Image: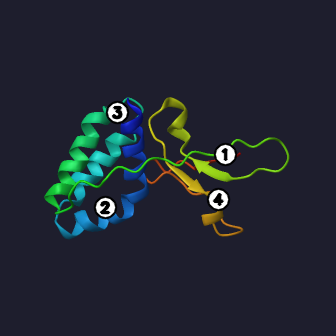
Amino acid sequence: MSDRQAQELARVCKSVDSMRSLADSKGLRSELDHILAELGEPAADVPTLLRQTAELLRRCGVPGAPRRPIPALADAQGGRPLEEFYFCPRQEDHRCTRLVHAFDIPEGTDAPSCRITGLPLRLRRF
């Protein structure tokens, strides 16, 4: 899987709730849920499933969104962390590039989770 596909998977994960609402309103929820369930499988054909997701969204009236690069992280030179992010647990196998800035997580709440698999995201400090 390419870096671009991993970034696209991260965008799908981040947008699952709104995608489900939209698919619900167009009568395509079960088709979307089927695609998402397959995306959650370790042996998933991610490129094909991403194309299916994009096609389903087009049928819902959503044009292709412009690609945004993932921001580069500063290199910490010791001491306290500069930044803290939650990363997708599937990033290690290069399947997803989703990250959530720890600043966006309310104090005292659990780590965010993957909206496809339900696995908790992992905290990394830089």
Q: Is residue 116 visible?
A: no
What residue appears at the point 40 percent right and 42 percent down from the top-left corner?
40
Tell me which amino acid carries mark 1: Ala
Q: CA distance from mark 3 to mark 2?
A: 20 Å
Residue 88 visible to an observer of this rendering = yes
Image quarter of residue 63: bottom left
Residue bearing the label numbered 1: 74
Residue type marked 3: Ala
Q: Which residue position is annotated with label 4?
A: 102
Type of amino acid under label 2: Met
Q: Are marks 1 and 2 in contact (CB under 8 Å)?
A: no
Q: Is residue 69 above or below residue 111?
A: above
Of the image marks 1 and 3, the number of the one nearer the N terminus: 3
Spatial CA distance of label 1 from label 3 is: 33 Å
Which residue is at 28% across, 55% downward? 65
- The tag earlier along the polypeptide, 1 or 4, is 1
The three-letter code of the residue at mark 4 reads Ala
Q: Secondary structure at mark 4?
A: helix
Of mark 3 and mark 2, the one earlier in the sequence is 2
| Closer mark to the observer between disc 1 and disc 2 | 1
Discs 1/4, front: 1
Q: Quadrant of the C terminus?
A: top right
What residue would you read off at disc 2?
A: 19
Residue 102's x, y, as percent? 64, 59
SS label for mark 2: helix
